[in-house]
Structures are given as C-alpha cells and as structure tokens.
Image (tube, rainbow, N blue to C red):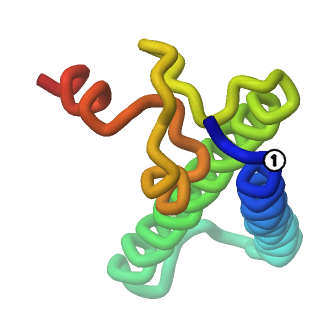
Amino acid sequence: MLTNKQIDHFKTQLEEMKEEAEKEIEDFQEEQTANSSSNEGELSSVADHPGNLGTSQHEKQKDMTFYEQSREKLMEVNDALQRIENGTFGVSEKTGEPIPVERLEIMPTARFNVDEVEEERS
C-alpha cells in the first residue's frame, strides 16, 4: 500500500499534469479562434499552390491529434485524481493488486499492472 506521503506526491504530480493538459487545450482553442477569424477576410479558399493546401491540411490534422491527446490525458488525470479521493489509487482495477510505485512514478495515471496490460494486448 502507498503511504500518505507517496499519495500526496502523486496527487501533486497529477495536478501539474492536469494544469499542463488544460493549458494545451486552451492554447489549441485560442489558436482555432484566431485562425477562423483571420480566414474570414479571404475571398477564395483556393491556395496559391496545391502544396500549400496539403501543408495546411497536414498542420490542422496534426494540431487536432495533439488536442485529442491532451483531452485524453486530462480525462486520465481526472480519473486518477478521483481514485485518490476514493482511496483506490495505486490498486489495479482488474485484480485489486497494488500497482508498483516504480510504475506509478513513470505513469501516475496507471490503472493496471504491466503484466495485466500485456495480457490484454495478447
């Protein structure tokens, strides 16, 4: 079982991760707002060169991927913080066995032991 000091450490770490994810989401949303307002004055959606359109689409898709990753990260962090509140943090949701501290140090949002994740993938 984790000590109160360890739980406090992970809670602090998770809260920092939460702030980071929220900032990434906010930055993306601000950028989308800025991009949509800057494109309002365009008379045509035709790019000067076909390559420009492809580059623009690629950048939009890349940004959307980062946004989705930030949203997923935020959900995982919120779930982990809820497990701390419920007293189930650091315990596998599958078996009820303790998750090693080393795993939590690397991935504080972990919900399962490594061998359980590997079993799921097989």
Q: Give left or right: position of 59 versus 16.
A: left
Instruction: Decide if residue 36 is in sight here.
Output: no
Looking at the image, which is closer to me, 76 or 92?
92
At 83% across and 77% down in the image, what residue appears?
38
Instruction: Decide if residue 4 is in sight here.
Output: yes
At label 1, which amino acid type do we have? Asn
Q: What x and y, as percent, mark residue 33? A: 86, 65
Looking at the image, which is closer to me, 56 or 116?
116
The quarter of the picture where the N terminus appears is top right
Q: Give left or right: position of 78 versus 101.
A: right
Q: Is residue 9 above or below residue 109?
A: below
At 84% across and 63% down in the image, what residue appears?
19
Query: How many marks overall?
Result: 1
Q: Residues within 10 Å of mark 1 (few under 14, many from 20)?
A: few
Looking at the image, which is closer to me, 100 or 109?
100
Q: What x and y, as percent, mark residue 87? A: 78, 25
Residue 24 placement: quadrant: bottom right
Q: What x and y, as percent, mark residue 2? A: 66, 42
Looking at the image, which is closer to me, 12 or 18?
12
Q: What x and y, as percent, mark residue 9? A: 76, 61
* Residue at the top extreme, as displayed: 95
Q: Give left or right: position of 109 versus 88.
A: left
The quarter of the picture where the C terminus appears is top left
Q: Secondary structure at mark 1?
A: helix
Q: Is residue 18 above or below residue 28?
A: above
Q: What residue is pinned by disc 1? A: 4
